[in-house]
Image (cartoon, rainbow, N blue to C red):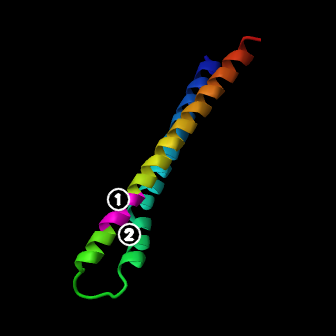
Amino acid sequence: MHVERVADQNARKEHLMQQVRSDMALAGAQTLIEVLPNEKCFLKCITKPSTSLSAWEQGCLGHCMDRYMEAFNIVSRTYVQRLSQEAESMRGNSSSSSSL
């Protein structure tokens, strides 16, 4: 009975920790998508601030954001693949060590 309660507490703790990690990753991704490209692209494309954007500035901002999002998506996919591979590797290691 006591062992089951400890196991249940450990499972809840692990679930909570995973949720916190997930929330932190989401917050980091939102920052990467919302803040960084705006700052970088603004500095690159807006050379003379005025009351409106020129056609060139609009095109530059659009192109800059598109490239940023492409790069972000590539990095995200690669990161998710690596996490999956590491998780699979850890599952393989734990199952082989438990069979000893």
Q: Amino acid at mark 2?
A: Asn
- Dot 1: what SS? helix
Which residue is pictured at 26% across the width and 73% down the height? 58
Instruction: Give the residues in magenta.
Output: 62-68
Q: Amino acid at mark 1?
A: Asp
Give the answer, above or below, for where 86 lies relative to 59: above
Front-most of 38 and 62? 62
Would you say residue 8 sits in the magenta stretch?
no
Question: Could you tell me residue 11's position as x and y percent?
Answer: 56, 29
Quadrant of res 83: top right
Q: Residues within 10 Å of mark 1 (few under 14, many from 20)?
A: few
Specify whether residue 54 is in view: yes
Q: From the image, which quarter does the N terminus lie in? A: top right
- Could you tell whether 73 is left or right of 6 in the image? left
Number of the label disc, if any, that sits on residue 66: 1
Q: Are marks 2 and 1 in contact (CB under 8 Å)?
A: no
- Could you tell whether 58 is left or right of 15 in the image? left
Please identify the dominant SS of the magenta region: helix
CA gap, disc 2 and disc 1? 12 Å
Give the answer, above or below, for where 41 lies relative to 91: below
Question: Could you tell me residue 42's position as x and y percent?
Answer: 38, 75
Question: Could you tell me residue 88's position as x and y percent?
Answer: 59, 26
Question: Could you tell me residue 65's position as x and y percent?
Answer: 36, 63
